[in-house]
Amino acid sequence: MKTDQELKHDVDQELLWDPALDARNVTATVLNRIVTLEGSVNSCAQKLALQKAVQRVAGSRAVVLDVVVRAPSPLRHSDEDLAAAIVSALQWQEGLPRDAIRAVVEHGCVTLTGEVEYGFQRQMAETLVTRMRGVVGVANQIEVRANPVAADISKQIADALQRRSRHKSEGVSVDVRDGVVRLTGVVDSLLDKRVACGVAWGTKGVRWVVDQLTVA
């Protein structure tokens, strides 16, 4: 198991190594294997890349992202131009229903509304918009259409973890009520945590996923 100092070194190196990142204004601290990032980046896409970079580093139990988006003047666009670009991107994105999602833009902050069939579509729309130039924040208010949740969702999550992990997944418990899936228990890594949440979000009828998993 890594010490906090070793984990901080690995996080710092990962941020320096990733060519997609400009983390000059971001600092990392580690306490009890919980990584906290503080500072600023110039886009939501950079913030997302920052989060993914830290999650690639083995040994952390959790990540706290205290990073704000400050877009430089040359990267700013009018709300009208940004809204038009978002509408076009949502229309062309494979896997998203056409004309089902609406966007409101105010000073670079985007609010998404509408209704989709799957939870993963809700997440996909948010990720797509987050990565667009000029976006400084996203409020995802997209709703998932109410459908019966598969009775074997617990087995689906367990099978997915078994396929993608070297370890067994007996530590994950799944509770489903009114389309809300609550995941509890202990997993071996942040990757296993993301896999479990991803399977839950990808199940028809799941409106929300409450992630209460902890990393050993």
Image: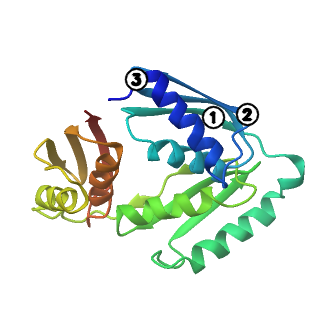
Residue drawn at x 14%, y 43% is 173
In the rendered image, the quadrant that contains the N terminus is: top left
The residue that disc 3 covers is 3
Left or right: where 113 falls relative to 148: right
x then y, percent, for residue 44? 65, 49
In the image, what residue occupies the spot 16% across and 44% down?
Answer: 172
Where is residue 58, by image quadrant? Answer: top left
Residue depicted at 17% across the width and 49% down the height: 167
Q: Calculate the distance from the C-alpha at mark 2 to the C-alpha at mark 3.
A: 24 Å
Verify CB contact (< 8 Å) between mark 1 and mark 3. Answer: no
| Distance from the alpha carbon under mark 1 to that under mark 3 | 24 Å
Q: Nearer the viewer, residue 175 or 1?
A: 1
Name the element at disc 2: loop
Expressed as whole percent of the image width and height from the top left, the position of residue 180 reads 25, 49
> What amino acid type should be assigned to the residue bearing mark 3?
Thr
Mark closest to the chain's N terminus, 2 or 1: 2
**Circle number at residue 56:** none
Q: Amino acid at mark 2?
A: Asn
- The residue indicated by pointer 1 is 67
**Number of the front mark, 1 or 3:** 3
